[in-house]
Amino acid sequence: RKEVEQDPGPFNVPEGATVAFNCTYSNSASQSFFWYRQDCRKEPKLLMSVYSSGNEDGRFTAQLNRASQYISLLIRDSKLSDSATYLCVVNKGYSTLTFGKGTMLLVSP
Amino acid sequence: EAGVAQSPRYKIIEKRQSVAFWCNPISGHATLYWYQQILGQGPKLLIQFQNNGVVDDSQLPKDRFSAERLKGVDSTLKIQPAKLEDSAVYLCASSSARPTITDTQYFGPGTRLTVL
């Protein structure tokens, strides 16, 4: 089993749609969790951290379920500018990050 | 604040040749990382430095890859000799002086390597 697994994608959605990405991780000792965004031919950038209580940043909501070792990202009211690859990232300790393969999102007019 | 700098941005070499990549982290960031990102995959950590010491190099192919950060600031990653499967984007990242489990890593623009 891979350390971090994500929906394979791509997700094609119209503007204004709500889309959810799922991610599972295998190491129960993982300590912190993130979603990074990567635009085509660009470097990854931190989108948001994920906390057990769930957290929201504008149109983006992240959830963590430690018991199920599951992380999600919900994007509401999708914009064209949301088109990118979303990377699920897990920190096993001492700032060592493990990235999933990423899920590509394409938002169309 | 200046971001993570990398050079060159692109490199094309033939297999069995050598290549070196350079990275300058954000000022004051003690932790530096080198990642390899193959097309269609997420970044994979190759090596992590804390100042000039190696924290994790478990996924670095040491028979051909080497990295150094002699003065605890900028870093060089070398491949010698290169193989076709080394074609990838090599990303450098840095994080703060006292990394924690919630620390944010900031990535440079990467070097896109093509091995022919």
Image (cartoon, rainbow, N blue to C red):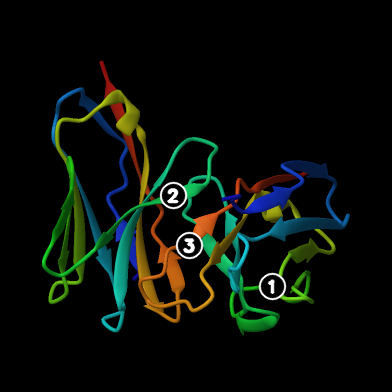
Left-right relation of A56 to B111: left
Single out the residue that lies furthest toward the front.
Answer: B1
Q: In this view, does A90 lie to the left or right of A45?
A: left
Dot 1 amino acid type: Pro
The residue type indicated by label 2 comes to: Lys
Q: Which of B66 and A95 is in front in this view?
A: A95
Numbered tag placed on residue B48 in the rendering: none
B52 sits left or right of A69 in the view: right
Which mark, by number, is residue B61?
1
Counting from the top left corner in percent of width and height, residue B83 is at: 76, 56
How far apart, in angstroms, are the residues tagged by discs 3 and 1? 23 Å
Circle 3 sits on which residue?
A: B105
Residue in front for this viewpoint, A56 or B2: B2
Q: Label 1 near label 2: C-beta < 8 Å?
A: no
**Location of residue A4 by image quarter:** bottom left
Which residue type does callout 3 highlight? Gln
- Disc 2: which residue: A45
Question: Residue B27 in the image: x percent, y percent?
Answer: 63, 62
Mark 2: give few (<14), some (14-19) or many (20+) Cα within 10 Å: some
Quadrant of image for the C terminus of chain B? top right
Instruction: Give the left or right position of residue B49, taking residue B80 as reference.
Output: left
Q: Residue at x 20, y 22 (%)?
A: A14
The image quadrant of residue A104 is: top left
Q: Mark 1 lies on which chain?
A: B
Numbered disc 1: secondary structure = loop
